[in-house]
Image (cartoon, rainbow, N blue to C red):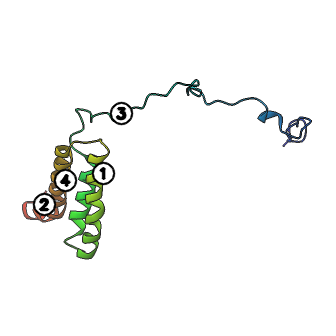
Amino acid sequence: MAWPSGGGQRSCRPGGRPAHLERPVQAAGRPGPAPEGVVPARRGRRPPRPSSLPSGHTAAAVAFTATVAPTWPAAGASCAVPAAMVALERVQSGAHYPSDVAAGAAIGLASAWLTRRAPRLILRHGP
């Protein structure tokens, strides 16, 4: 494999600073610094979108906790705290309304119940 001219080394300016660091770099699409005396506008928190029902994060956390808890109570108890924290965080961050989180928790509980009962229901009634 052949190296580019200079053996792969970057050329340096007389001060020892590499040439590629001499030009100013600004990320594309980002505004530069605000002019002196101008205070940038602070973005407020947006309300949740109308399609935020239900909270999928809460549904997944509650479903996992409710599925594990009957088989391994200690793990279920330790999973309940993070599941509750997920639910609270979704409301606190403004991603969901409390009703969205409650609906997600109900869906999580229903899916956990179905996951635990489905094998018995299938065996009882046949495929």
Q: CA distance from mark 2 to mark 3?
A: 51 Å
Q: CA distance from mark 4 to mark 3?
A: 28 Å
Residue at the image position 13 percent from the left and 60 percent from the top? 122
From the image, tell me which residue sits under label 2. 122
The residue nearer to you, when weighing 31 against 70, is: 31
Discs 1/3, front:
3
Discs 2/4, front:
4
Q: Amino acid at mark 3?
A: Gly
**Circle nearer the N terminus (1, 3):** 3
Q: Amino acid at mark 4?
A: Ala
Q: Which mark is residue 105?
A: 4
On the rendered image, what quadrant is the C terminus found in?
bottom left
**Circle nearer the N terminus (1, 4):** 1
Discs 1/4, front:
1
Q: Which mark is residue 44?
A: 3
Discs 4/3, front:
3
Q: Secondary structure at mark 4?
A: helix
Discs 2/3, front:
3
From the image, tell me which residue sits under label 1. 89
The residue nearer to you, when weighing 46 against 57, is: 46
Q: CA distance from mark 1 to mark 2?
A: 37 Å
Q: Is residue 41 above or below residue 105?
A: above
Are the residues tagged 4 and 3 within 8 Å (C-beta)?
no
Q: Amino acid at mark 1?
A: Glu
Q: Residues within 10 Å of mark 3 (few under 14, many from 20)?
A: few
Residue 25: quarter of image? top right
Residue at the image position 42 percent from the left and 32 percent from the top? 42
Q: Secondary structure at mark 1?
A: helix
